[in-house]
Image: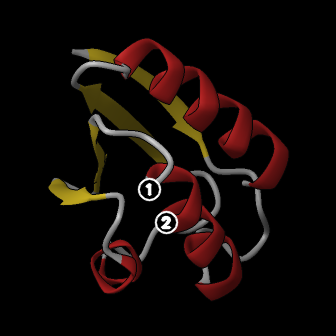
């Protein structure tokens, strides 16, 4: 399992548009990708679960990737977060 932490810098936090793009990015990989925030852990391929976290600007999230392509998955997710959130 690979993980990284990221502090959200987007003024609106993880809102609908980037959450939808996040789901698309997560679905590119066979590894299970999870987002941990506000004491909860959700699957990164489930839009409504991501939205239910209510992640705001300044919140630090932990992203986990576990599976065959976890190295590529974590690299892809790191790039996504730094470019979009």
Q: Point out the frontmost of discs 1 and 2.
A: 1
Indicate whether 73 appears above or below 32.
Answer: above
Indicate whether 34 appears above or below 43.
Answer: above
Q: Residue furthest right?
A: 83
Depth order, front residue of 55/16: 16
Where residue 70 sits: x, y (%)? 36, 20
Tell me the CA gap for discs 1 and 2: 6 Å
Q: Which residue is mark 1?
A: 27
**Residue at horizontal 75 percent and vertical 51 percent from the top:** 9
Q: Which mark is residue 53?
A: none
Q: Which residue is mark 2?
A: 23
Indicate whether 18 appears above or below 37.
Answer: below
Where residue 17 sits: x, y (%)? 70, 82
Q: Could you say whether the residue bearing mark 1 is in a helix, strand or loop?
A: loop
**Residue at horizontal 59 percent and vertical 21 percent from the top:** 75
**Residue at horizontal 59 percent and vertical 40 percent from the top:** 7
Indicate whether 35 appears above or below 62.
Answer: below
Residue 47 seen in the current view: yes
Say how many tags the image has. Answer: 2
Depth order, front residue of 64/10: 64
Contact between marks 1 and 2 (CB within 8 A): the answer is: yes
Q: Please tell me how crowded label 2 is: few (under 14), some (14-19), or many (20+) other residues with Cα within 10 Å.
A: some
Question: Is residue 82 left or right of 46 when viewed as pictured?
Answer: right
Quadrant of the frame with the N terminus: top left
- The structure's colour scheme is secondary structure
- State the image quarter where residue 53 is shown: bottom left
Question: Is residue 33 left or right of 16 when viewed as pictured?
Answer: left
Q: Could you say whether the residue bearing mark 2 is in a helix, strand or loop?
A: helix
- State the image quarter where residue 16 is shown: bottom right
Quadrant of the frame with the C terminus: bottom right
**Residue at horizontal 37 percent and vertical 35 percent from the top:** 62
Q: Please tell me how crowded label 1 is: few (under 14), some (14-19), or many (20+) other residues with Cα within 10 Å.
A: some
């Amino acid at each position: 399992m690979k993980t990284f932490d990221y502090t959200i810098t987007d003024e609106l936090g993880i809102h609908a548009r980037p959450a939808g793009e996040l789901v698309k990015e997560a679905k590119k990989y066979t590894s299970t990708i999870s987002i941990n925030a506000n004491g909860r852990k959700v699957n990164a391929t489930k839009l409504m679960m991501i939205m239910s976290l209510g992640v705001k600007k300044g919140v630090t999230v932990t992203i986990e990737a576990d599976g065959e392509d976890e190295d590529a998955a974590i690299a892809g997710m790191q790039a996504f977060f730094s470019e979009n959130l």
